[in-house]
Image: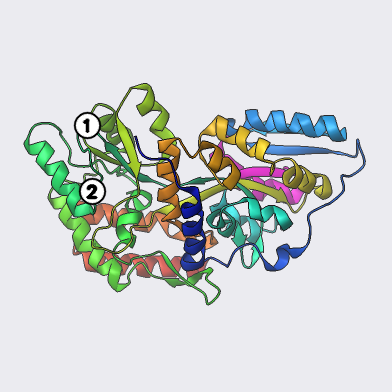
Amino acid sequence: MRPRLLLPAVLAAATLLATACGGGGGDKGDDKTAPPASAPAAGNGSLTVWADDARAKPLQDIAAAFTRDKGVKIKVVQKGLGEIRDDFVSQAPTGQGPDVVVGPHDWLGKLVHNGVLAPLELGDRAAAFSPVALEAMRYEGRTYGLPYAVDSIALLRNTDLAPQAPASFDELLATGRRLVEQGRAELPVAVPVDAKSGSPYHLYPLQTSFGCRVFGTKPDGAYDQAKLELDSPGCQRFGPWLRGLGKDGVLSTSLTADIATDAFLKGKTPFLLAGPWDAATFRAAHVPFAVDPVPSVDGSPARPFVGVQGFFVGAKSANPILAQDFVLNYLSTPQAQRALYDTGGRVPATTAVLEQVGNDPVVAGFARAAQAGLPTPNLPAMDSVWADWGLTQLAIIQGHGDPGELTSAMAGRIRAKIVAG
């Protein structure tokens, strides 16, 4: 078991992270205005909320309290997470969209540029959330979402096979290979790689350890889509290293997420790079495991993508004051944020709720991993990045072409796509 999370130190680290990793500068500027202070008249209109099945149930309970207090009906419509963003963009301008949606922060760029999101003024409520969560909800200097959870991948370690956390990725590989040689494991480490789309998400902490990021930043720290960095000197060093892992059989394009998860579940590997989604399965199967930040490859920090889940208010809402009242005054409460945690198990974005559950070693481990990470860019340009990025990784892992040339060609294609819009 890991020691209890030292929250003061963690929060201080998170503050430093937000300052260092960029993306804006916290909840300031436009957020000085106080949120709606008074509720609208009872019975004035209704609201529609779009949510996936994981969030629909707790939202219904919170919505019931709003209806009870305000006499305003809220309809929670359950939709597939993969449908919500694009349906919102297409339906909101016609008046058929929802008043509130829940989803990840990296939707922001596309939603804002399509004019379907209204800014949120968190006011004093901003102090309740971790800096990295607030940072992710900002776009072009304004806040658009109320956060509630933080996600990132971390290193899951079978504590029977590997009692000590590795200090570096090289040490991790040495331990894994030794266990394979001893016949105690079949894989030195399980890193999921999709055979069709590659693994930009899972490989990102290793890539950033080479100083290779997707985008550079503006002077205010926000991501700048004009500064694609996927062919930076760090990325040119990462390619050959990735090729080496493929050549040695450490990485394989046949090791999908399901196969990697199953290998860890059955004790066939001491290490797995994964998010918190399968932690309950490992616990139920009594797998002895700990959660650590991903170790560095060469001494530089390994920084995973951080995704922040939150609530957004539609710019085309027929009842914008009601919608903001529901989000700011009901979804931001510690009780509501705790209910969302209890249902989904995601690391809380609210520091008070994180303090309540921080003695859980899995939550504490993923919280530390996220605090070491970087918010996933919420730029619309990310839609132009993923496909070429992943396919290039596949080619490098499989040994098709020179890694440096593949990396340069990939960056050229992505820049052309971004320019073309």
Say few, some or many: other residues with alpha carbon within 10 Å of mark 1 (under 14 / 14 to 19 / 20 or more). Answer: few
Q: For numbered disc 2, what is the local secondary structure?
A: loop
Q: Nearer the viewer, residue 146 or 316?
A: 146
Which numbered tag is attached to residue 160?
Answer: 1
- The image position of residue 116, as x and y in percent, is 70, 54
Say few, some or many: other residues with alpha carbon within 10 Å of mark 2 (under 14 / 14 to 19 / 20 or more). Answer: some
Residue extending farthest to the top is 285
Span colored in magenta: 79-103
Query: As shown in the figure, which amino acid type bears the numbered disc 2?
Result: Pro
- The image position of residue 174, as x and y in percent, is 14, 48
Q: Is residue 223 above or below residue 373?
A: below
Q: Is residue 405 above or below residue 306?
A: below
Q: For numbered disc 1, what is the local secondary structure?
A: loop
- The image position of residue 147, as x and y in percent, is 61, 48
Quarter in which the N terminus is drawn: top left
Between the C-alphas of marks 2 and 1, the distance is 14 Å
The answer to whether 269 appears left or right of 411 in the picture is left
* Mark 2 and mark 1 residues within 8 Å of each other at the beta carbon: no
**Residue denoted by label 2:** 166
Q: Nearer the viewer, residue 187 or 407?
A: 187
What residue is at 75 percent from the left and 38 percent from the top? 48
The answer to whether 256 appears left or right of 110 in the picture is left
Query: As shown in the figure, which amino acid type bears the numbered disc 1?
Result: Asp
- The image position of residue 194, as x and y in percent, is 32, 43
Is residue 79 visible in the rendered structure shown here? no
